Image (cartoon, rainbow, N blue to C red):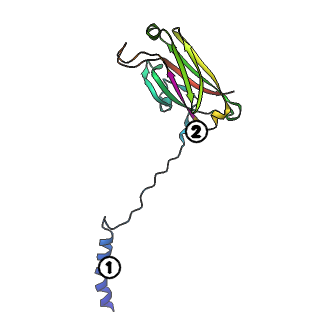
Amino acid sequence: MRRLMLRGFPALLMIVAVMSAPGCLRRKKAQVETVEEYSKDMASVVHSADPASAVQLLKGFHDVEQNAWRWTKSQFSVTLRVPGGARTKGGKLELKFTLPEVVIHHTKSTTLSAKMNQWILEPQSYSQAGEHLYTREVPAEALQADAVTVDFSFDKFLAAGQVEMRELAAIVSTVALESK
């Protein structure tokens, strides 16, 4: 009996060695779980020059200039955290921006439109250079999620190559969503 165990031992080692070969083992696939923790770190007021806010600038923004502001393209999008109380009271969207003289000189006027998820906000036209504030009331029904995406669009802008190699529409400083 003792001899049988000794003979079986090398066979057992052989089975273990074969089973542990890379092609024979069944490995569990790693499961990646997406957890949306970004919404609690997300701000309801975004300063376009703030590096911490850059992840909320989804598209249509150029790089920061003079550590203070960014040019936008004709279409740009921002994600904002819905502030407390806005789900029941509604909110107010504010976009602070500048239309430089070069833009107004070439376009004469431009109209800014905004859409928040499915909600289309009233557009506004501008025909003077300088600082502007686009403000719109947002109904509570539009603010039921933890965060919302706002898509902005200028109908007239400087096409790439018209003044420089980039498409230019406005200089944005802040985008904010406040509770009423």
Compared with 84, 104 (above or below) is: above
Mark 1–mark 2 distance (CA, rounded to whole Å): 55 Å
Q: Where's residue 50, x and y in %?
A: 49, 26
Q: Residues within 10 Å of mark 2 (few under 14, many from 20)?
A: few
* Magenta highlight on residue 151: yes
Q: Which residue is mark 1?
A: 12
Q: Where's residue 127, x and y in %?
A: 53, 9
- Secondary structure, magenta segment, majority class: strand
Compared with 103, 25 (above or below) is: below
Which of 82/103 is in front? 103
Magenta extent:
148-153
Q: Where's residue 158, x and y in %?
A: 42, 15
Residue visible at 51% across and 9% down?
129
Please state if 149 lies on the left or on the right of 18 as rendered.
right
Image quadrant in which you'd find residue 124: top right
Compared with 172, 119 (above or below) is: below
Position of the C terminus by quadrant: top right
Please state if 171 lies on the left or on the right of 119 as rendered.
left
Please state if 160 lies on the left or on the right of 145 as rendered.
left
Pair 1/2: label in front: 2
Q: Residues within 10 Å of mark 1 (few under 14, many from 20)?
A: few
As shown in the figure, which amino acid type bears the numbered disc 1?
Answer: Leu
Q: Which residue is mark 2?
A: 40
Position of the N terminus by quadrant: bottom left
